[in-house]
Amino acid sequence: MAELIQATLQANKAYPAGLTRIFGEKPVNTDGVIFHSHGTVLICGASAVVAADAARRLLARASDLRVVVFAPGIDAIADLPRAVTRVGGRIVSIKGHLGAFTATVPAGNGREEDAGLFSPNADHVFDLVLDLFATPLLQASVPPVGYFAVGDSTTAVVRALETLPSLVGIFHKPKFFDYEASLCSHRVNGVAGCNRCLAVCAAQAIRASATDVEVDPYLCQGCASCALVCPSGAMRFPLPAASELAAGIARPGAPGEVRKDILLVHDAAVQADLDSVPSTRLQRLEVNPLLAFNERLWLQALAQGYAGVRLLLSPTLPVLTRAAIQAKVVEMREILGVIGRDPAALAAVEAQDLAASIRGLAAVHTTSPALPVGNGVGKRASLLGVIDGLTRKNLRKDAAPLPVGAPFGKVTVDARSCTMCLACVNICPTLALSGRMAPTPQIGFQESLCVQCGLCRTVCPEKSISLQPRFVTEPSRRNEIRIVNRDELVPCSRCNTPFIGRHFLASSIKMMLARPGALPSAADFLRLCPSCRQRGITAT
């Protein structure tokens, strides 16, 4: 695995998106995906003149490429190289990735037809795409490898023309992610719940399936946003190893020495910006991608004695990725505040704001002992272990509200409308909700297990459930099973055997009598236990 990390880092210097060029034999048992690019470039745009110019400049750089141009009026452009295939139509949609792009053109009556007929490749796909439209055909903020949307930017055109020729051949890209469906809270029994990973994927590589989510490894480019926001650890980012990052946190100084006590975490994209940053108090740690250094490691650094952690935001970070970091920082700052720590110890900052953000933090000496850290199994348990290690004693508050979408909180059940049908219990993917019908109907709730996925609220037929994002500081309170609703069993009207909850029976009778043509005597049938109903049916 270490060799793969190093190969990926080296490849980033020559190719985009962590690609490694493969020469000779195709590797076997490689963790990742393989791209085959034969050098067929699709150029599409609204202006034939602009498209023709791009084709000439591209082939002047790499004459062995094959270029297919889709632009209205391209047939009238003279002096195009022989390697150019001209098509006067307009591309209306594109999908795919390096070595496997497909495109469509309008065919009338609202239909679209495949444009692959014009590709010289045997499989009728395009290897690379240069999109010259003012509004890109693909809207992902992190486009697929091999797709270049340049609009009217001269700089972007030059960069694309320089890069396109290098993307011919066979390439390897790491898989970047691990996914364990059994931990996922996205969908249960066809009901949609947590969608945090789908909401933050800048590459649009994650999509909902019939049972959970699916990640396209060809589209994923390893930003680690999904792993950061996943509350259960179903989505994980294995590179670089968390143990290596954790080792990078602990850098003790000499006894009594004022250490570089602010941990500055950054990625390679901001390396040049750091040359002018004062380093008197800063311990730098480069992590690629930045979000692989997750919230547990942020807090673990504080537990190791750092006065603060600063996450340096690169200007190249996609909007969704940046928003995911900032939202998680807000969430963790709220938790730091309620457990008696300084919320200002943690921040995500721009390079120009770094000095101001650390000015008020007090220095920490190496004589300060590291705090104990719990060793819970799994993402959630290990995060709670670090939080509990940081928690001060004799806190003034035992709970604090968190922003909407935070993965900690409680479930509240309205006892007046709840019928104790236990639909919420049956669908809860983390077993935070539990229930029983005998000897007395009741619903229990364990807050430490709740990820606020909303499945219980969605499936409740009476809309009796509400969610409240919050963090409870006392572990015993989080781990206890609290009874959030209870009922009593009603006896059978014939044999006097308790068999059904009072609220559920009342709701069933109400629904039955509301049906057109229902007789009042129908309610008497519901008051019988199953055995007595069966005997009554058999007797008739």
Image (cartoon, rainbow, N blue to C red):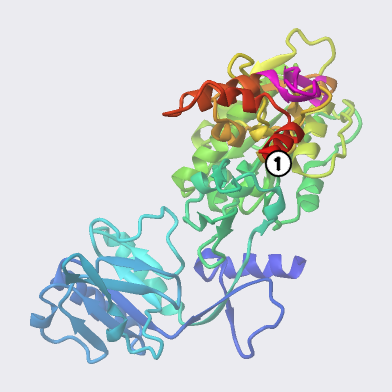
Report helix, strand or loop for mark 1. helix
Image x and y of residue 332, in percent: 65, 29
Q: Residue furthest top?
A: 396
Horizontal relation, residue 147 to residue 51: left or right: right
State the residue position of label 1: 538
Q: Nearer the viewer, residue 311 or 479?
A: 479
Horizontal relation, residue 306 to residue 87: left or right: right
Q: At 72% from the left edge and 38% from the top edge, which residue is drawn?
A: 534
Total labels drawn = 1
Q: At 39% from the left edge and 91% from the top edge, which residue is drawn?
A: 122
- Can residue 207 be seen by looking at this rendering? yes
Q: Nearer the viewer, residue 178 or 71?
A: 178
Horizontal relation, residue 59 to residue 405: left or right: left
**Vertical position of residue 20 compared to residue 356: above or below:** below
Image x and y of residue 127, in percent: 40, 78
Image x and y of residue 367, in percent: 90, 26
Screen quadrant of the N terminus: bottom right
Image x and y of residue 83, in percent: 27, 90
| Residue stretch in magenta | 477-502
Q: Nearer the viewer, residue 129 or 210?
A: 210
**Vertical position of residue 423 compared to residue 29: above or below:** above
- Can residue 260 be seen by looking at this rendering? no
Would you call the spot at circle 1 few (<14 residues within 10 Å), some (14-19), or many (20 or more)? few
Q: Is residue 489 magenta?
A: yes
Where residue 148 sits, quadrant-wise, is: bottom left
Q: At 36% from the left edge and 55% from the top edge, which residue is drawn?
A: 139
Screen quadrant of the C terminus: top right
Q: Residue furthest front?
A: 540
Q: Is residue 234 magenta?
A: no
Report the amino acid beneath label 1: Thr
**Vertical position of residue 318 compared to residue 453: above or below:** below
